[in-house]
């Protein structure tokens, strides 16, 4: 089971084209996954790599999707796992950023203070630099920057939404854990991490989880208790969140990690469970609606294991593009 999940997460490598150092977005090849030289986006304290897919017919003010792989994966393998984004990118006018972690079994750092703190110099800082670079280079709409990820990439999506809420307007997260769930763990991979979180052993009230989120982008003076409904300490709006989990996931405990994430973002957005919609968006899936369904949605996938297949069309609807 474990081995199968890991192999699925790794996927197969897509054909990749190296690019010369691009001086502008016009120099980046289109309709093909392209590696961007690491000097392009500025700070890179955690040595991340970046691949990018942009369609040739991108028009003014495109949207950006930051898509994060799971442990043992890579940007190119994740591009394979989310391939529908390529055909959808032209009609929906977006480009996709596929960064790669090459540290800690290719997992994203969702454990150390440097990554769990805004501008702390960890993976979150590097990913923020990548997003800012791409937004400028492609003259993208900064209000249409989204994040999605699978497994470790979902864990990191929740961390990015907490450390840089000002950069993202929506999250679609597959098979992860709440932001801050691995805080204090010696690593973030199945091999290096304290397994208590993945096993569903970290439980908090919604308000406690919300404080964890707010603490990741603290006021410069370290003060402040949050600006209220859906807002960070600094007054930024938190992105809307949808999160997916398979109830057959024995790798990242389904019940507790799914539930704790819903508690976390439910407390941030001050929404409570309202209703289930069964067999949405597909047979065996249950859409769990919180509030009016515009800020928080959960998708419980019956009989699905650790790898919930990416639902790209549902993601785009959630992103509103
Ligand atoms: C891009 O636009 C051109 C001109 O409108 C069209 O011929 C071409 O098929 C489009 N390419 C894609 C990938 O949609
Ligand atoms: C809604 O669906 C979830 C996931 O299947 C289930 O755990 C929960 O009990 C359901 N809630 C209600 C009120 O039916």
Image (cartoon, helix red, strand yellow):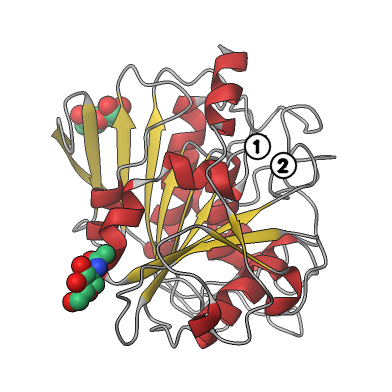
Query: Could you tell me residue 38's position as x and y percent?
Result: 74, 69
The location of residue 166, given as percent across then percent down, is 51, 78
Q: Is mark 2 within 8 Å of ligand 2?
A: no
Quarter occupied by residue 169: bottom left
Q: Which residue is mark 1?
A: 71
Say if disc 1 is inside 8 Å of ligand 2. no
Residue 235 appears in the figure: no
Residue at image location 66% in from the left, 75% down from the top? 129
- Location of residue 9 with respect to 62 vertically, above or below: above
Residue under numbered circle 2: 106
Pointers 2 and 1 in contact (C-beta within 8 Å): yes
Secondary structure under tag 2 reads loop
Please report whichever mark, 2 or 1, sits nearer to the chain's N-terminal start: 1
Above or below residue 317? Residue 82 is above
Image position, residue 74 (x, y; %): 62, 44
Of the four image quadrants, the one with ligand 1 is: bottom left
Pick whichever, 267 or 17, lies toward us: 17
Q: Residue at x 80, y 62 (%)?
A: 114
Q: Residue furthest top?
A: 1
**Residue 40 bears which disc, if any?**
none
Label 2 neighbourhood size at 10 Å, few (<14), some (14-19), many (20+)? many
In front here: 61 or 26? Answer: 26
- Quadrant where the N terminus lies? top right
Residue 303 in view (yes/no): yes
Q: CA distance from mark 2 to mark 1?
A: 5 Å
Residue at x 16%, y 36% (from the top left corner): 280
Q: Is residue 250 above or below residue 106?
A: above
Q: Secondary structure at mark 1?
A: loop
């Amino acid at each position: 089971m474990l081995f199968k999940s890991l192999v699925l997460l790794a996927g197969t490598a897509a054909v990749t084209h190296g690019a010369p150092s691009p001086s502008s977005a016009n120099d980046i090849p289109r309709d093909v996954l392209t590696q961007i030289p690491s000097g392009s986006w500025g700070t890179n304290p955690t040595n991340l790599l970046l691949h990018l897919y942009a369609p040739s017919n991108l028009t003014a003010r495109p949207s950006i999707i930051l898509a994060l792989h799971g442990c043992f994966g890579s940007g190119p393998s994740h591009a394979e796992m989310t391939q529908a984004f390529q055909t959808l990118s032209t009609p929906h006018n977006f480009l996709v950023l596929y960064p790669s972690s090459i540290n800690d079994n290719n997992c994203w750092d969702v454990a150390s203070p440097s990554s769990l703190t805004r501008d702390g110099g960890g993976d979150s800082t590097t990913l923020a630099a990548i997003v800012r670079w791409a937004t400028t280079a492609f003259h993208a709409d900064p209000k249409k920057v989204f994040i999605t990820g699978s497994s470790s990439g979902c864990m990191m999506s929740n961390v990015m939404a907490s450390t840089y809420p000002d950069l993202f307007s929506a999250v679609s997260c597959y098979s992860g854990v709440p932001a801050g769930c691995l805080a204090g763990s010696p690593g973030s991979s199945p091999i290096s991490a304290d397994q208590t979180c993945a096993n569903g052993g970290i439980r908090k009230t919604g308000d406690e989880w919300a404080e964890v989120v707010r603490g990741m982008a603290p006021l410069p003076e370290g003060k402040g208790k949050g600006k209220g409904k859906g807002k960070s300490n600094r007054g930024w709006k938190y992105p809307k969140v949808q999160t997916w989990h398979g109830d057959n996931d024995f790798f990242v405990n389904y019940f507790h990690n799914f539930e704790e994430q819903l508690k976390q973002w439910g407390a941030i957005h001050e929404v409570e469970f309202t209703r289930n919609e069964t067999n949405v968006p597909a047979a065996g899936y249950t859409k769990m609606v919180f509030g009016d369904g515009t800020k928080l949605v959960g998708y419980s996938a019956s009989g699905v294991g650790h790898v919930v297949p990416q639902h790209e069309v549902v993601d785009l609807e959630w992103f509103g593009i």
